[in-house]
């Protein structure tokens, strides 16, 4: 008796399967390449917008720092430490300049910087310019809604009441 094997294909069938698989792979790679091109174009557009906004901000005398680890789509503006009335006036003036250039800001949150000195870091972002963040440090007032809680495992957190 002759043994029959069902997995035997003809050479034409094998060539057609290889060709079909290669075409599917080409289509997949073209799709991936189109997605990468779209993402690169979006990143480039965002980087150009951030660089233009940074130039406008620096034109008003406020330095804008680009992190070395970033791809050019992020800019950080540090307004320094606010402890005195003069510092507060400078902060208000700088925020007014930033609003004139960048528009309204969105609250990014507060975080504890130094529990011993009661320093809190305040961060804001600008919805019209994603990638630009502004921060400054200020002392937490005695009658603030937030309080510093010291934990037993040797760390401190900032807890805010809504």
Image: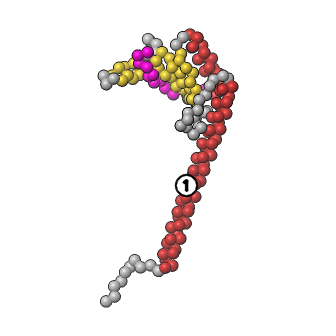
In-image side of 50 versus 10 (left or right)? right
Is the stretch drawn in magenta largely helix, strand or loop?
strand
For the record, the magenta segment spans: 103-117
Which residue is depicted at the point 33% across and 23% down?
A: 154
Quadrant location of residue 71?
Answer: top right
In the image, residue 28 above or below residue 54: below
Which residue is depicted at the point 65% across and 26% down?
A: 57
Quadrant location of residue 95?
Answer: top right
Secondary element type, mark 1: helix
In the rendered view of the protein, which quadrant contains the C terminus? top left
Q: Residue furthest bottom?
A: 1
Q: Position of residue 116 (x, y in %)?
A: 41, 16
Q: Position of residue 45 (x, y in %)?
A: 64, 41
Q: Position of residue 15 (x, y in %)?
A: 51, 75
Q: Residue furthest top?
A: 85
In-image side of 49 versus 84 (left or right)? right
Q: Is residue 131 visible?
A: no
Residue named by callout 1? 32
Q: Position of residue 161 (x, y in %)?
A: 42, 20
In the image, residue 121 above or below residue 1: above
Which residue is depicted at the point 56% across and 61% down?
A: 27
Residue 35 forms part of the magenta stretch: no
Which residue is depicted at the point 62% across and 25% down?
A: 63
In the rendered view of the protein, which quadrant contains the N terminus? bottom left
Residue 106 forms part of the magenta stretch: yes
In the image, residue 63 above or below residue 39: above
């Amino acid at each position: 008796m002759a043994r029959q094997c069902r997995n035997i294909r003809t050479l034409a069938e094998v060539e057609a399967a290889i060709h079909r698989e290669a075409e599917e792979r080409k289509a997949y790679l073209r799709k991936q390449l189109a997605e990468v091109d779209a993402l690169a174009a979006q990143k480039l557009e965002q980087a150009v917008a951030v660089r233009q906004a940074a130039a406008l901000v620096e034109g008003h005398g406020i330095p804008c720092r680009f992190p070395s680890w970033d791809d050019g789509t992020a800019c950080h503006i540090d307004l320094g430490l606010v402890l005195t009335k003069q510092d507060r006036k400078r902060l208000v003036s700088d925020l007014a300049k930033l609003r004139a250039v960048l528009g309204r800001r969105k609250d990014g949150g507060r975080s504890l910087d130094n529990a011993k000195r009661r320093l809190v870091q305040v961060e804001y972002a600008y919805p019209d310019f994603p990638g630009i963040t502004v921060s400054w440090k200020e002392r937490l007032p005695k009658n603030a809604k937030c309080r510093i809680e010291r934990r037993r495992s040797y760390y401190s957190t900032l807890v805010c009441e809504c």
